[in-house]
Image (cartoon, helix red, strand yellow):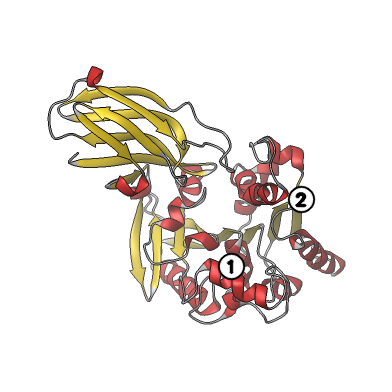
Amino acid sequence: MKKITAYTHIGDYGQAVDNFRFMADNEVKTDEVSLTLEGNYCDMSGRILSKGVTAVSAEDGVVTVEVDPFLYRYDFRICGKIGGEEICLTKDGVDEVIVKDLDTFAPVEENGVHYRLYSPEAADKRPLVLFLHGGGECGEDNVLQLTGTLGALRLAQIWPEMYVMAPQAPGGSLTMEENFKVMAERGHPFRVDIGMTPFALKGERGWNRDYLGKVADIIRRMIREGKVDARRVYVIGMSMGGGGTINMVSTAPDLFAAALPICPSMNGESYPQLLHWPDVPVWISTSYMDHQHGRHAYIHNACCKLWSEGRKDVKYTIYLPEELEKYGIGTSEDLTAKEMDAENHNSWILTLHNANGILDWMISHVKDK
């Protein structure tokens, strides 16, 4: 094969494959193509297979293999014959991956910040939504923050008239697994020790304050240039990005009209910041239980403190099992407790589908000045 391309989209469960295109060395007829697909899982725990290959066509030496969408993160195999050539394709053999609508976000590097920016077609000032990804999408490729999970691409579909900014947090010197190992050596990986989180270190992996300050400066520059409406800047983030949302508002409280931290990491940085939350409307959402078992308890404790102080602009939603099940979360058979926790962590799916009107609530807020 001269070239193999995978065409994908970002769905509720992340990046999913729609079709493959094989550029053959010679002309191939449709009836000369015979392929089978393995590892084509379409659920979050790798239990349920999609319907596999649904159609094959060949024209001008290009063979298009349509598939019932499956998640690209799994180790799939396409085996069989194309013309007289035996093939057995895995992810490593794909030459190019095309992501639907990825090109609507321009790649930018500014002052050490890697980010993607969706810009609306408008002559006047527009609102801006800042999206902060989770821990698995750190790095410098300036792509993974859009493709790792449902997120910024979805927001641009919902609000095509707004700017959507999606920076990529630095990878740092430690991988996510190595960070968890550091935390495990201190006790429990998800233990909340005040001032004891590697994510807080300048230049380290994740949404550290130095990096977030640079992100805030870029938004302020866009405001000065008359592109962004200073009264309507919002921030939304999930998991590590939920903790990053709390850290972002703590770093630049004057910048935001409202914030949506989703299943935010509760650690020695984000928990005290939430306890002393600034004057910014916030709606936190999370599942009833996920891999950080104490997450909702710490959030609830901080919210109770804020409510006792008269804060009516602080909201907290805990998604129940039946609410998660409506989106296929936790519905696969025979899930282990660990697998159930991992699936429940995807509570951002509900928020990004505007559960309880949460997205509408966020953009309803407009600062006085």
Q: Which residue is mark 1?
A: 244
Give the amino acid type for the residue marked by disc 2 in the picture. Tyr
Q: Which residue is mark 2?
A: 288
Query: For this rendering, which residue is in front, 109 or 227?
Result: 109
Crowd tier of the residue under label 1, counting other residues whose Cα lies within 10 Å: few below 14, some 14–19, many 20 or above: many
| Residue 294 is at least partly visible in this image | yes
Query: For this rendering, which residue is in front, 152 or 254?
Result: 152
Viewport quadrant of the N terminus: top left
Residue at figure coordinates x 28%, y 47% from the top left: 96
Label 1: state its secondary structure: helix
Decide: is 163 above or below 179. above
Total count of labels: 2
In which image quadrant can residue 259 be found? bottom right
Q: Position of residue 165 (x, y in %)?
A: 45, 59
Decide: is 234 above or below 155. below
Give the amino acid type for the residue marked by disc 1 in the picture. Gly
Decide: is 226 above or below 157. below
Residue at figure coordinates x 66%, y 65% from the top left: 265
Q: Position of residue 191 (x, y in %)?
A: 73, 71
Q: Position of residue 176 (x, y in %)?
A: 53, 67
**Left or right side of 37 for 244:** right
Label 2: state its secondary structure: loop
Viewport quadrant of the C terminus: bottom right
Residue at figure coordinates x 64%, y 68% from the top left: 246
In which image quadrant can residue 119 be found? bottom left
Q: CA distance from mark 2 to mark 1?
A: 21 Å
- Tell me which label, 2 or 1, sits earlier in the chain: 1
| Residue 132 is at least partly visible in this image | no
The furthest residue to the right: 308
**Front disc: 2 or 1:** 2
In which image quadrant can residue 200 be found? bottom right
Query: For this rendering, which residue is in front, 297 or 158?
Result: 297
